[in-house]
Image (cartoon, coloured by chain):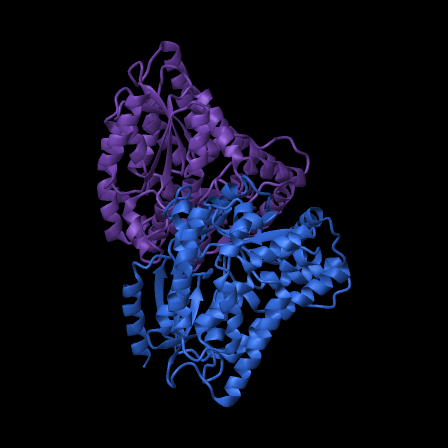
Chain colours: A blue, B purple
Amino acid sequence: MANYLQMWKDLGMDIENHDNLCAVLPTAFGDTYLSQENRPAAMDFWDMVVADIHGIRPAELIEEQKKGRKVFGTFCVYVPDEVVLAADGIVTGLCGGSQFWVPDGEAVLPKSTCPLIKASVGARLGKTCPFFRIADMYVGETTCDGKKKAWEILGKDVPMHIMDMPQMKRPKDYDKWVEEIKEFAKVVEELTGNEITRDKLENAIKIINAKRKAIERVYQARKADKLPISGKDVLLMTQIAFFDDPERCATMCNKLADELEQRIKDGVSVFPEGTKRIMVSGTPMAIPNWKLHHIIETSGAAVVCEETCTGTRYFENLVEEGKTTLEEQYRAIAERYMGINCACFTPNTGRIDDIIRLAKEYKVDGVIDVNLKFCCLYDTEGKSVEEALKENGIPVLGIETDYTDSDAQQLRTRIEAFVEMLG
Amino acid sequence: MANYLQMWKDLGMDIENHDNLCAVLPTAFGDTYLSQENRPAAMDFWDMVVADIHGIRPAELIEEQKKGRKVFGTFCVYVPDEVVLAADGIVTGLCGGSQFWVPDGEAVLPKSTCPLIKASVGARLGKTCPFFRIADMYVGETTCDGKKKAWEILGKDVPMHIMDMPQMKRPKDYDKWVEEIKEFAKVVEELTGNEITRDKLENAIKIINAKRKAIERVYQARKADKLPISGKDVLLMTQIAFFDDPERCATMCNKLADELEQRIKDGVSVFPEGTKRIMVSGTPMAIPNWKLHHIIETSGAAVVCEETCTGTRYFENLVEEGKTTLEEQYRAIAERYMGINCACFTPNTGRIDDIIRLAKEYKVDGVIDVNLKFCCLYDTEGKSVEEALKENGIPVLGIETDYTDSDAQQLRTRIEAFVEMLG
């Protein structure tokens, strides 16, 4: 990755510390991913992206910035990419999936904050994430206590726009979210210098919908009895979707889906027959957090679906196309995003319905409901999730974990016992 | 307290478990309160209320219910009492200040939930709080993650209305809060069967304002160089204000203020000259949580002000009176409540301003910024509070605690060292 050294220096990154990160990632990736057998050939693309995760895409973003485009760094599936894209802006995810960044986050945040937020803040303050350095603006939302307070730290030295999520889902909350999206659109227009028109927004809606459809095709392939792809590989695809150009993302996901559909026709599977089918529900898994999937898929089971923000919550439901006015388009966008069932809402019964539906659609043998340590929202909701699954006769294992390896052996023991019990 | 046994039985309470609570409270109160010397005579009222905390006021509420009045149980200083009172309803606080209730809460909530929420849910589910049993409706708000999810548990068997707090303080958030208050008013009208008119609301605004002014008079007396009252006693007065009839509360607080003002004239103090003046900032202290005040005031210092929800956030600022329409009144109410600076907002710089202002007004020697364990909001904000205080040359000690006694000795050591350092 040495050829990006000058770029990282120009970005004001902490090169020495960043080198430490670069030194461990390839081994982690090799152990987790490259050890898999019979992977779809189309995964080559994502392997290549990960190999230079802080190089290839950051370099592209900088090239686009030179042409005058603006980069918006986002943290959450509720921020509407369509609006940014319609103003010729670029959306990128921000780092937050590694224990590497946690200590720098803990320097300013309570230890009892979830690892995702601690890692994000640490990646920013430690200057070891190029995406944080590149973004012209961060876009936050008021989804949880930890993030609400994190914005006050992150917004100190970079322009920050915060969208106030309604905390409920009454009709007036939809109206409110429409207003938040329109206000965001104004901010985006101002920063990019580009007006959002009905046609540009329509085009953006189509591009993002196409990306969603492509990801969904890959997910559809996981409903097959013979699984053509591992859960780990799909997780990687989704994680990188947050960072990639949406059109390239769609192309690559469709290419992968083509291969998976052929595999299904050919009866090719990456798992032995009878492998137990697991759905993971709960908190998001930001790259490079592959911990739970790796443990599950080396414990005699396969992950066939993720009811998470790095799973179905990211791509399910489309924005309705073909609206004739901006006002109607903003409402269509609001409706699609308010359809995401995050535990930040009260009540959030729609999520229980989603989990039961997905468990059936993906023919799962059991659900592992995972909570990132100190995520009060998903942790509390976990109780209702477990109750609902039991009522529906679906075995469930509730676990809590963080980014460290200290609980890996204990998790493996519990997950192996759970999988065995499914037999 | 035996004469209330039938009432508790009629309320469906867990008598046996409740007896355990009743058995420990008098000792705790005696040790903490009655051991103080030279207390204002007017404190007799609050001593009497505490002695029968689950008897006197619950019996009154039940009497009022027999006359057809409805009781609204609330958890938070953002719920506008004025609206309930205008419809001839009654507002009561709900239990949540004792470790006694925590285990029952932990049966359904994550351990890493703040003790206030765990205790509230435990008091409800364990059937050991008469106020939870009496309330015809609970009124929640979306101020923090823990509470948002707690409503889903508490709302299972009692009517629950939730007000969606804006999470920011832009002009449109004030508009939104007006709408939430108007919606709440409709719910209150429906449950009570009483219409809210301009004149009734004006009367209610005046009653609640009078209560605030009376509490403020007591606080004003704490600005005197010779302190006429302990912080513990004022905390008790404020804690009980959440449960009491607002007119009686005002009468009693004014009577206490009369006595304190006379004491100031007479140069009477409950602390030796030179006692260090401490402001406590941070999370609320629900009755019977007197832990921190007791430690501070038996460590050579006095608490002169609480920048908490059981302190200045409860009574500061009045609702503007004399508005001519309901619409204007609801806006005036919204403006007063949005003036409260809770850490649930982002950003919340107004709270820093409050703390610096109060520290000067009350001539404090130091601030103890306290966080109830696992309150992510105040914990994270604590860092900005400490920085701001240091910039203003005001010594600050940040502490985190819960309802248990296990850290009492350690806290005492730290607080004694802090007070000594102020010398």
Q: How far from the left and from the top, in percent, is residue A158?
A: 57, 42
Above or below, B151 against B375 in this view is: below
Q: Nearer the viewer, residue A208 or A130?
A: A130
Whether residue B211 appears in this view of the structure is no
Please provide percent x and percent y for residue B146. Answer: 42, 51
Residue A412 coordinates in the image, percent (x, y): 30, 68
Position of the C terminus of chain B by quadrant:
top left
Asked if residue B343 lies left or right of residue A396, the reply is right
Tally of numbered tags: 0
In the image, farthest residue toward the front: A3
Whether residue B40 is visible:
yes
Is A381 placed above or below B394 here? below
The answer to whether residue B229 is left or right of residue A55 is left
Rendered residue at 62%/72% (across/down)? A251
What residue is at 63 percent from the left and 39 percent from the top?
B331
Q: Quadrant for residue B1, please give it.
A: top left
Whole-percent x, y for residue A102 in the image:
40, 50
* Depicted B57 relative to depicted A47: above or below: above
Q: Nearer the viewer, residue A356 or B420?
A: B420
Q: Who is closer to the viewer here, B120 or A354?
A: A354
Q: Using the image, determine if residue B248 lies above or below residue A86.
A: above
Query: Which of these two is toward me, B7 or B383?
Result: B383
Work out which residue is located at the far bottom of the displayed protein and give it: A266
